[in-house]
Amino acid sequence: MWRGLRPLITDLPQQAEARDLAHVRALPHTPGNVASNVWNKGLYLSYYRDANYYGILKPGATAAESQQSLSDHHIEWFLLWGKDTPVPAYLADYTQTSSALDGDLRVFHRN
């Protein structure tokens, strides 16, 4: 029984974060295909907004490879986490539509 409780206890901080993201309305409900630069936060927010979550882009990919991946997977929305994170070149076809969490989340939509 103890072994079964360990994952629940160790995941408590992530569960609290997931609950907090349930109230973020930066994405429309059922927005379509979503990608992010942070796996878990993007996953939680996509779940609560009923989106199809692609995940994060391949680490180390060039801007052109990342743009191609976004296009190939028909990613309509991109969640950029980090207040000081510069907008990557692969988001050239996207426009920022909203922000939330005091600027820690910026939401981009494909033009």
Image (cartoon, grey):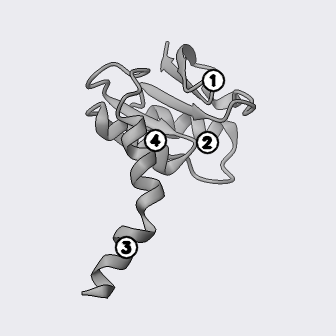
Say left or right for 73 vs 60: left
Whether pointer 1 and pointer 4 mark residues with C-beta atoms closer than 8 Å, the reply is no
Q: CA distance from mark 3 to mark 2?
A: 36 Å
Q: CA distance from mark 2 to mark 4?
A: 21 Å
Q: CA distance from mark 1 to mark 4?
A: 15 Å
Q: Residue at x 55, y 27 (%)?
A: 101
Say left or right for 34 vs 56: left
Q: Which residue is mark 1?
A: 103
Of circles 1 and 2, which is in front?
1
Residue type at the position of mark 3: Pro
User: Which element is circle 2 on?
Assistant: helix
Q: Which residue is mark 3?
A: 7
Query: Mark 3 vs mark 4: which is more N-terminal?
Result: 3
> Height in image: 12 above or below 93?
below
Q: Which residue is mark 4?
A: 42
Q: Which residue is mark 2?
A: 65
Q: CA distance from mark 3 to mark 4?
A: 21 Å
